[in-house]
Image (cartoon, rainbow, N blue to C red):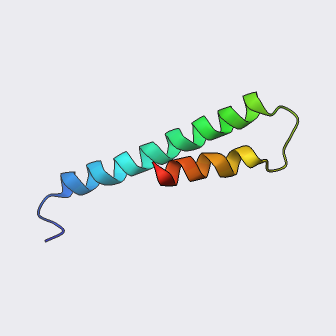
Amino acid sequence: MAYRRPRDWLMTISGIVLLFIVAAAVAMGYLVTSHPGKPEPNPGIVEEQEAENGG
């Protein structure tokens, strides 16, 4: 069952990993550019997560 279409699994896993890397890069860039010199957590992170889960 799992070995029928290995390409589908590869594309699915690759897509998830790619999305995760892109999301992490965007989040890091957003935090660095929007809140320079503020390494501590801020309400913006919570709002972003809520928008992601809700949408």
Residue drawn 71% across the image and 44% down it: 44
User: Percent x, y for residue 36?
Assistant: 83, 31
User: In the picture, which quadrant includes the N terminus?
Assistant: bottom left
Is the residue 27 above or below the residue 52 in the image? Answer: above
User: Farthest residue in the bottom direction?
Assistant: 1
37 or 46, which is in the foreground? 46
User: Percent x, y for residue 26?
Assistant: 59, 35
Q: Number of callouts in the render?
A: 0
Horizontally, residue 36 falls left or right of residue 12, namely right
Residue drawn 72% across the image and 37% down it: 31
Residue drawn 59% across the image and 37% down it: 25
Is the residue 37 above or below the residue 40 in the image? Answer: above
Is the residue 48 above or below the residue 9 in the image? Answer: above
User: Percent x, y for residue 45?
Assistant: 69, 47
User: Percent x, y for residue 51?
Assistant: 55, 47
User: Farthest residue in the top direction?
Assistant: 33
Is the residue 23 above or below the residue 6 in the image? Answer: above
Residue 27 found in image quarter:
top right
Horizontally, residue 53 falls left or right of residue 28, namely left
Residue drawn 43% across the image and 49% down it: 17
32 or 44, which is in the foreground? 44
9 or 33, which is in the foreground? 33
